[in-house]
Each structure stands twice: as structure tokens, then as C-alpha cells.
Image (cartoon, rainbow, N blue to C red):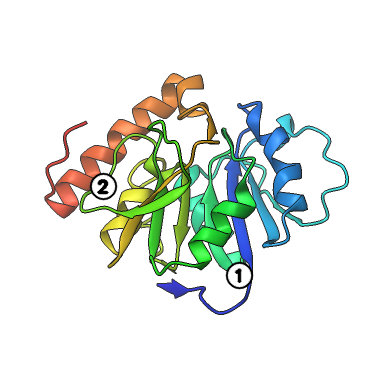
């Protein structure tokens, strides 16, 4: 476990293979937001990297291979210096400043997002893991290293299960697509299925997908 409730501001950790158009729209929004102190970009497909200019907050990391999502999150969090946000590369949150301000005013130790339509930006407690897109954007106060056998799936579920006060973010300005990268290649679907089977067997948890 690593506790990041120590420095003012946020580290935004993003793993990407450049399969979504939303990332290049979202990076400048993170850059302009005062509460975002660093953008830790884990590049899992460096040959596809576009030219990125004038984004001084980016901490770029690549091993010139696909680390896959969960190991990339582990690496990104290990590099971070501030409170942690893990964000997908396929979402757009124009009001990120308001979202982070709301998180600061509350005392949740884990937050994911809702894809349901909402009239207001708000946080609410949850009593069970939300399967649809919950882990696309996460605030994690106490990050637990995800076991290395899980490559794509169950990283968000692992964090949720280790939280004591989880909640959910409703945001009327949320835009994007769920699992753009995973849907782009059949091999990712196969790895995801394997992750689910390992998790069920290892933790003896029945999860209906």
C-alpha cells in the first residue's frame, strides 16, 4: 500500500496505446488545471506516439513494449508525488477542476465514476462495485499494488476491495467511450477473460460479467 495523502495537488496517471481521440483533447485540460501537478503518461505503444507540444506537466515513461494496463498503473503510481488520480485515455472531463475540488472537500478513500446521466456534479457512497466504467477515472487515497498476474482486468476491483470508504462521481460533463483500447484488438479480450478466471480462482469470488 502507498498513501499519497501528503502533498497538495494531484498526479494524473494515464496508460495509453493511442487508440482513442479523447486523450489529445484531455491532456491540455489537465495541463491548465492548477490542482493537477503532474501528468504521468505510460506509453504502451511508443511507435504510435503523436507529437505533443507545450505540456510541461507530462512525465513520460515507456519501456518500448506493452506493459498492459495494471502493471502500467503500478509503475505510474510509483513515479507519482501527489494524490493519485488514475484516468483512462478515452475520457473527456472538461470540468476536471471542479471534480478535484469536490474530492478535496470530502473524505472518500476511493472514488470511481458513473456513466449514468446526471444533472449535477456530486459524490455519493457506494456499497458494491460498479461494473460499467467505474474504473475509467479513479481517485485512490491508499493505492495497493496490483498483483502482476492481472494484466488488464480487476485492477480497479482490487483497489475497491481494499478501500474502506468508497464512493462514486456523478458528472454531467463526462464524455468519452468505455474500453476503446480493449475493443480495438481481440487479443486484449482474451487477456481480459484470463484475468477474470485467475481472479475468481485465486480469491474465490463469484463475479458475473
* Residue lying furthest front: 119
Report whether 8 appears left or right of 189: right
Asked whether residue 149 is in view, the answer is no
* Residue at mark 1: 82
From mark 1 to mark 2, how far is it between C-alphas? Answer: 25 Å
Disc 2 on helix, strand or loop? loop
Tell me where residue 196 appears, x and y as whole percent. Answer: 26, 39
User: Could you tell me which residue is drawn at 59 percent across and 40 percent down?
Assistant: 93
User: Could you tell me which residue is drawn at 55 percent across and 52 percent down?
Assistant: 99
Tell me where residue 19 appears, x and y as whole percent. Answer: 61, 26
Tell me where residue 90 appears, x and y as whole percent. Answer: 56, 33
Q: Are marks 1 and 2 in contact (CB under 8 Å)?
A: no
Return the mark for residue 129: 2
Where is residue 12, by image quadrant? bottom right
Q: From the viewer's side, name the closer residue of 114 and 191.
A: 114
The relative height of residue 17 versus residue 37 in the rendered view (above or below) is above
> Circle 2: is it few (<14), some (14-19), or many (20+) Cα within 10 Å?
some
Where is residue 118, by image quadrant? top left
Position of the N terminus by quadrant: bottom left
Disc 1 on helix, strand or loop? loop
Asked whether residue 166 is in view, the answer is yes
Q: From the viewer's side, name the closer residue of 40 and 123.
A: 123
* Residue lying furthest right: 54
Position of the C terminus by quadrant: top left
Q: From the viewer's side, name the closer residue of 182 and 27.
A: 27
The relative height of residue 87 versus residue 18 in the rendered view (above or below) is below
> Circle 1: is it few (<14), some (14-19), or many (20+) Cα within 10 Å?
many
Q: Earlier in the sequence, mark 1 or mark 2?
A: 1
Amino acid at each position: 500500500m502507498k498513501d499519497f495523502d501528503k502533498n497538495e495537488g494531484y498526479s494524473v496517471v494515464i496508460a495509453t496505446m493511442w487508440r482513442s481521440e479523447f486523450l489529445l483533447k484531455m491532456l491540455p485540460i489537465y495541463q491548465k488545471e492548477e490542482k493537477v501537478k503532474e501528468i504521468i503518461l505510460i506509453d504502451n505503444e511508443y511507435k504510435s506516439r503523436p507529437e505533443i507540444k507545450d505540456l510541461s506537466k507530462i512525465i513520460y515513461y515507456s519501456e518500448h513494449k506493452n506493459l498492459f494496463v495494471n502493471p502500467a498503473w503500478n509503475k505510474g503510481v510509483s513515479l507519482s508525488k501527489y494524490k493519485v488520480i488514475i484516468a483512462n485515455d478515452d475520457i473527456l472531463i472538461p470540468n476536471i477542476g471542479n471534480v478535484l475540488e469536490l474530492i478535496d472537500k470530502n473524505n472518500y478513500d476511493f472514488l470511481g465514476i458513473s456513466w449514468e446521466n446526471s444533472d449535477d456534479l456530486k459524490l455519493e457512497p457506494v456499497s458494491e462495485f460498479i461494473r460499467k466504467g467505474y474504473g475509467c477515472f479513479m481517485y485512490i487515497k491508499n493505492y495497493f499494488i496490483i498483483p502482476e498476474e492481472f494484466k488488464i482486468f480487476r485492477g480497479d476491483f482490487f483497489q475497491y476491495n481494499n478501500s474502506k470508504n468508497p464512493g462514486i462521481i456523478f458528472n454531467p460533463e463526462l464524455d468519452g467511450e468505455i474500453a476503446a483500447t480493449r475493443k480495438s484488438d481481440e487479443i486484449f479480450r482474451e487477456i481480459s477473460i484470463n484475468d477474470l478466471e485467475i481472479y475468481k480462482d485465486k480469491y474465490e469470488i463469484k463475479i458475473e460479467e
